[in-house]
Image (cartoon, rainbow, N blue to C red):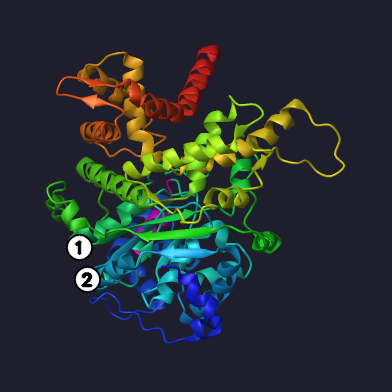
Amino acid sequence: MDILEERRRSSDLGHALRTFTPSPYRGAPPLSAGALNRMVLESQYLRYVTKEVAMETGESVDLVREEASGILDEMSQNLQLGFIRLLGFTLSKVFKRLFSHININQEGLNRLQQAIQESPVILMPNHRSYVDFLVLSYILFTYDLPIPVIAAGIPLMDMKMVGEILRRSGAFFIRRAIGSDKLYWAVLSEYVKTIVRTGYAPVEFYVEGLRSRTLKSLTPKLGMMHMVLEPFFKGEVYDITLVPISISYDRVLEESLLAHELLGVPKPRETTMGLLKARRVLEEDYGSMHVYFGMPLSVRQLTKGRVDRCEYNLLPRDLPHRPSVETQECVSWLAQQVIRVQEQSSILSPWSLMACLVLQDHQNTDPGLSWELLTQRTLWLKGLAISFGARLDWPGRCTVMASSMALHRSVIRCHQGRVTLLEEEGPVGAGPFTTEEGVVRRARAVLMVAAYRNQALHVFIRPAMLALAIHTTRSSQREDIYSYFRFLLDLFSNDFIFITGRSSQDFEEACSLLRKCGAVQTSQQEVTSPEEGQRTTSFLRALLQPFIDAYQVCGGLNVCLK
C-alpha cells in the first residue's frame, strides 16, 4: 500500500498533530532519556571499567567518570514527541515532492506491531541513501508504532540545528573511529545494552555499517550486532527479535554523488548549509520507494544449538566478557541471515533489469543498442528474474520501460531508436578537457547505471556462478563443477553475501533455478548445459565478467609491482 496516497488527500498538519498512542514492549518500564542515562552511568559494568581505565591511565576515578558522562552526553538521544511531530509534518511535505509512491507491506507492519509487544526489537534496514535514516521513523509514527532510537554517525550531530532535531527525534551518535578507546567502547555498549535490556524503544541500526556506494549489499559489521545480542546471551532478556527491512528506490537521491565518490572525489562534509543547497533535489522526480518489513527473526530460535550460553554464567554479568569463537561465528551467521532476508525482500524496478542489459551491450554496440531489441531482452529478463524468485515492481501500463528511461534521463537517452549512455557535461565555457577528464565523464554514467544493475545481482549471482563453473571447467562432472563453484564462492566472498557453511545448499539452489528455466540438465553425477540454454547462461556469465576483470587487473598490477 502507498502511504503517500492518504497524505495527498488530507492535511499534513492534522497528520502530525493527531493522537499518538503506540503500544510498547509489555515489560518496559516508563523511562525518560535522562533516567536511561543515569542507569548507564550507575551500572556496575561502567563502574568496573572506569576503575580499570583509572588504574591504567593514572587518573582519578572521579575524573574518568566525568569523562564517561561527557561521552554519554555527546552520544545519547533525547527522543521527544514534539520533534517527532515536527519531523512528521516536514517529511510529509518533502516525501510528496520527491516520490510518487512510498509502498509498504501491511502484513509486515502487523507482524512488527506484534513483535514489539512481545520482546525487545532490533530494526535492521539496508542502507542505500540518507533518506533511509528518516523514513522508518516516519512510517512507524504514521502507524502508531513506537519510534526507534537510531544509531547515527557523529558528522550528523555537527550539523547546526539539524543535529539537535535528529537527536530529539531518536538519533544517538557514534564516532567513526573508536579504535582502542576502552572507555568509549564501554559507554557505547552499556548504553545500547541498557536500551535493549529495558525495552526502552526499538533499536535501529545498519548491519552493513556504511551506506553502500555501489547499491549492493556490503559484508556486515559486527560491533553493534554483538552489543544488541549480549543481553540475550547473558540471560537478561528472554528473547530478542530481529526485523530485516529492505528499502528499495527507483532512483536514489545521491546517485551522482555516489558515482563521483567511487571515482575518488572526496565525500562532501555533512553541513546544514550543504543540506540547504541540496534543496534543488526537490525539483527532481525519484519515482517510487519500497519499504518491505521482513519476517521477524527470533534470536532464541535461531541460536538454539549454536551457542552455549552457559559460558556467560562463569563470570558475573557486570564484568566485561570477551565472546567465544563460537559466539562470534554465530553473530556473524545471524548478520548474514539478516542481509540475505533484506536481499530477498528487495523490490526490483524495470530499470534494474534494463541496466543489466545496457551495460552488457555498452562495450559492444555502436552507436548504441536498439530500443526494440532492449525491449525484447528486458521482457525476457523479466520472466527469468520472476522464475528465480525476484520481487518486481512492474506497473501494468505499456509505457513502463519508457517511463524508466525518462526517470534516468541524466545518464541514458533514446535517440533515433538507439539507446546510449550520456557523458557528464562540463562547466559552461570550459575549454577542451584532458583524456583523463574524458574518461571520468564517461565513467560517471557507467557507474551510475552499474549501481542499479547491482540491485539485481543477488537474484542472479548463484546461477551465474554455476554457469561460469560449467563454462570454465569444460566438464560435465558434478564434483568438478561443484569444486569450481566453491572456489567462486570464496573469490566473491567480499563482493556478495554468502551464508557461511551453505555452499552445498547454494549449489543445489543454483542447479534448481537453472534446471527450472531449461538452462541446465542434472543427474546425480553430471550437470550439463544444453544448446537451448545458452542464451541464459551467456547472459549470466556476462553479469560476472566485470568482477572477474577487476580481479584480473588487480592481480596483474600486483605481479607488476612484485
297 left or right of 492 in image: left
Q: CA distance from mark 1 to mark 2?
A: 9 Å
Considering the numbered disc 2 on the image, is that residue within a helix, a strand or a loop? helix
Examine the structure image and report whether residue 190 is included in the region drawn in magenta: yes
Q: Nearer the N terminus, badge 1 or badge 2?
A: 2
Q: Is residue 75 visible?
A: no
Vertical placement of 305 versus 199: above or below? above
Residue drawn at (64%, 34%), measured in percent from left and top? Answer: 443
Highlighted magenta segment, given as a residue range: 180-191
15 left or right of 416 in image: left
Considering the numbered disc 1 on the image, is that residue within a helix, a strand or a loop? loop
Bin the neighbour count of mark 1 within 10 Å (Cα to Cα): few under 14, some 14-19, many 20 and up.
some
Bin the neighbour count of mark 2 within 10 Å (Cα to Cα): few under 14, some 14-19, many 20 and up.
some
Q: Looking at the magenta stretch, what is its main secondary structure? A: helix
Task: Say which quarter of the image contains residue 29.
Answer: bottom left
Q: Nearer the viewer, mark 1 or mark 2?
A: 2
181 left or right of 83 in image: left
Q: What residue does disc 1 label?
A: 239
Vertical placement of 557 versus 68: above or below? above
Query: What is the x, y in percent for residue 233?
Result: 20, 56
Circle 1/circle 2 CB separation < 8 Å: yes
455 left or right of 334 in image: right
Q: As rendered, which of 380 and 170 lies closer to the eye?
A: 380
Residue drawn at (23%, 76%), measured in percent from left and top? Answer: 27
Query: What is the x, y in percent for residue 339?
Result: 34, 48
Q: Amino acid at mark 2?
A: Glu
Query: What is the x, y in percent for residue 138?
Result: 47, 71
Q: As rendered, which of 473 and 34 lies closer to the eye?
A: 473
Query: What is the x, y in percent for residue 108?
Result: 31, 64
Residue drawn at (20%, 63%), measured in percent from left and top? Answer: 239
Q: What residue does disc 2 label?
A: 118
